[in-house]
Image: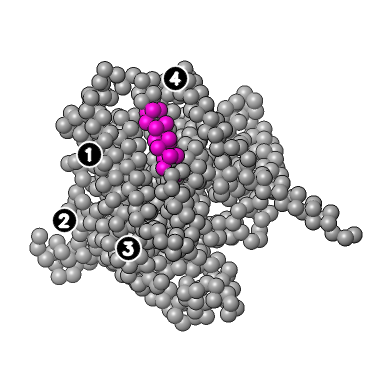
Amino acid sequence: MNTQFWVVQAFNGVSYGALLFLIGSGLSLIFGVMRIVNLSHGAYFLWGGYIALSVIHFTGSWALSLPVAALAVALIGLAMERLFLRSEGLAFLRTAVIASGVGVLIGLAISAKWPALIGGGWIQFTTLTVLATIAMYFLFSRISIVPVDTDVLRQVLLTVGFAFLFQQAALDIWGGNNMDINPPPAFTQSIVVGGVYLPLYRVFMIGMAVAIGVVLWLVMEKTRMGAAVRATVDDAQMARGVGIDTNRVSMFIFALGAFLAALGGVIGGAFLGIYPGLDFEMLPLAFAVVIIGGMGSLGGAAIGALAVGLADNFGKALFPEISYFTLYAPMVLILAVKPTGLFGRE
Amino acid sequence: MVSTNVKILIVAVGLLAFAYIVPQSGSFVVLLATRAMAFAILAMSVDLLLGFTGMSSMGQAAYFGVGAYLTAVLATKFHFGMGWDFWLVVVMGILIGCALAALFGLFAIRAGGVYFLMITLALGQCVWGLAYRWNSLTGGDNGINMSGRPNFGLDLGNEVTFFYLVFAFFAVSMILLYVLVRSPFGRSLAGIRERELRMQILGYNTWLHKYIAFVIAGGFGGLAGVLWAHTNGHVSPETVVLTTSVDSLLMVVLGGAGTLVGAAIGTAIVFGLREFLSTLVPWWQYALGGVYVLTILYLPMGLMGIPSRFRQRTQSKDEGAKKLASKPS
């Protein structure tokens, strides 16, 4: 264990922290603004990676895959927030989405259980699904939903439900194999600093996270929208009282959070790989970032990401048998001493 | 309203019918029911916290996991617990669950609401991290394979015998928890759930009440873990993973939080869906995700809450009709 070991491990830790910042900062902002513990955040990460793979497959452009994947997942997040995490408005659309989901499942179930009944044809299957959807629409439009706006536990379980749906959908669309996102060859080289080889891609990751962090900071501190976001984090009711449209703020933050997580998925996919189950692997780490840094604090998320990245790397290198323990135990201690995290506000 | 005695009678008859029918329904159903009952003990312990005390723990799998790992490690490394000493392992499993909850409770109980959720998540991840990485003790990702079940005159290797044993544990746990929540202690827990501040003002030590409930729930979690290990003959980090904790929460909410029977019914439904569907179709997880989403959106009180939701509805209709009738035309 010479200096080189420490430098390399610290560098790896910082670059992993850069990735964790992308997934953690969004989670933190979503919690701060909406008080929602979003357990489908890992799924956004995974979907970002998978969509990027498809974009690369069809266009061959890695650079294009970054914005496309991130924007696509931001749209998914936006739809989820508008339709299911808020109660007012769009009741028709919500019922339609639920009814068609249940309708497709009924169609699939019937064709799996009694294949003879519908002959396995596409037309029969579609007819069956449409009929089931219409029936379900009438059923569900007669039952009112119970808003989840204030109930933390129900929000958690709802987002878990979506995480499972996303997981299965990813499995159906992209299959169960471990896939890699290959960045352009220019990034696969290493640079040598003081006799230590540093992979260029990890340098890029750090640069990317710093750039995004700076942009986010500027948006939060210098723009009107950022001020509205900060006001909502501090006291949503008061913010509404002074005329801030917190509804729009939530929408913006949820989409932004999904965008950042998906970006993390594309960037992280190059060295983590993209595979089923990655979503629930990243999720607790993202929570560790948020908890250590304090929910709703951008600077906290940066410090938390750095701390978790370093703790994870050094833990795995120095005490492999208890490496995750060395990561989560400090998190418990921080929470026990200061439940709102290091930089969170009461 | 159905009176309490009638409700108890319905549950008792239901349980006896269950114990009578299942063993005649083939080995697949017997194993499925055994697994579900072992897990239902965990779900009921979650219900004690969530439904009766108002604490939503995201780390209940930790106690389940230590119970299961204790059983597996003792059985494979020390050949302990495969005869009469099985009962000792049961006691040790309960005690280790209590002990871990007693330790974790010191950190967790202080926090309220979403912070309690977070800290129990972190505590659960601590145990998962150890199970996943501590290769020399837990076998890491591969877990521990156990060979056979205990035999002490009663051969638990027989699926039906084992089913009856787990059934007995399940029924006794349900009765004990029922007695607990109906006791004055249980009533004060419900008071804390409804309004903690008021209970504090009335002079209750709410921290201690919550702590004791947390420790008891840990003990039942440990018991469930011991039974789970013997049911599957295999213990892996999957037992302690975050989704196990979240699943147990869903089962409680699906059945109806604050009703122990609901927790058991919720467990039965989730297990039934998962195990039956996964043998039939590859997309069973859509159904599970769908159950999560639909339960949360449409059935916040769970299946046990359906009657009261109907009653509410007809009541509000009646009131609406009355209002219309009393309006001067």
Q: Residue at x 34, y 41 (%)?
A: B221
Residue that mark 3 sits on: A335
Residue named by callout 1: B139
The verdict on a common chain for dots 2 and 3 is yes
Residue at the extreme bottom: A222
- Chain where mark 3 sits: A
Q: Marks 1 and 2: in contact by CB < 8 Å?
A: no
Q: Which numbered disc, 2 or 3, marks the residue that appears first in the sequence?
A: 2
Q: Secondary structure at mark 1?
A: loop
Please tell me how crowded label 3 is: few (under 14), some (14-19), or many (20+) other residues with Cα within 10 Å: many
| Vertical arrangement, residue B27 with respect to residue B70, above or below | above
Q: Residues within 10 Å of mark 1 (few under 14, many from 20)?
A: some
Instruction: Based on the picture, tell me whether residue B172 belongs to the magenta stretch.
Output: yes
For the residues bearing labels 2 and 3, Cβ distance under 8 angstroms: no
Q: Amino acid at mark 4?
A: Pro
Callout 4 and callout 3 share a chain: no
Q: Are marks 1 and 4 on the same chain?
A: yes
Specify start and end residues of the magenta stretch as a single range: B166-181
At horizontal 34% and vertical 34% (from top left) the residue drawn is B228
- What residue does disc 4 label? B23
